[in-house]
Amino acid sequence: MSDEHEHKHDHPQHVEARVITTAGTFPAEGYEKEPATRPVEAILKRAAHELHLVDTSTWIARCNGVDLRPHHSYAENGLKGRVDIDYGPPERGGGSHA
């Protein structure tokens, strides 16, 4: 019946993503529909441009507390569905080291 057609959709082709920074959120409302095969850095660059961020060369992208690899795709980073990407400078000091 329709099992073959449904099987093709086991791996989502798109994710809905937004980037959250201290300067604001991109997009301002809702989420961007992104191909799961697109590198995460694409939306980070668009966010930096739209939010007028000056130097993000040392910034870190995280989702659910896990550091992302921006040069890798959403799928390669294990992201699917709707994702909020926290983007900002690395945290400095303050933590205790065991």
Image: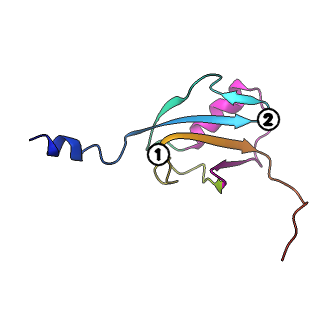
Check disc 1 and report its element: helix, strand or loop.
loop
Numbered disc total: 2
Q: Name the foreground residue: 41 vs 9.
A: 9
Q: Residue at x 52, y 53 (%)?
A: 77
Percent across and percent down for residue 48 are 71, 32
Question: Disc 1 residue type?
Answer: Lys
Q: Which mark is residue 9?
A: none
Q: Residue at x 24, y 45 (%)?
A: 8
Q: Residue at x 43, y 44 (%)?
A: 37
Q: Name the foreground residue: 58 vs 26.
A: 26
Magenta residue span: 40-65
Magenta-drawn stretch contains 69: no
- The reply to whether discs 1 and 2 touch (Cβ–Cβ < 8 Å) is no
Q: Residues within 10 Å of mark 1 (few under 14, many from 20)?
A: some
Q: Give me the C-alpha separation between circle 1 and circle 2.
A: 24 Å
Q: How is the image coloured?
A: rainbow
| Residue underneath mark 2 | 22
Q: Residue at x 44, y 42 (%)?
A: 36
| Residue underneath mark 1 | 80
Q: Is residue 87 above or below residue 66?
A: above
For the N terminus, the image quarter is: top left
Q: Is residue 21 above or below residue 96?
A: above
Question: Disc 2 residue type?
Answer: Thr
Percent across and percent down for residue 91 are 83, 53
Percent across and percent down for residue 27 are 62, 25
Among the two numbered marks 1 and 2 on one chain, the one whose residue lies closer to the N terminus: 2
Quarter of the figure with residue 3: top left
For the C terminus, the image quarter is: bottom right
Q: Name the foreground residue: 83 vs 55.
A: 83
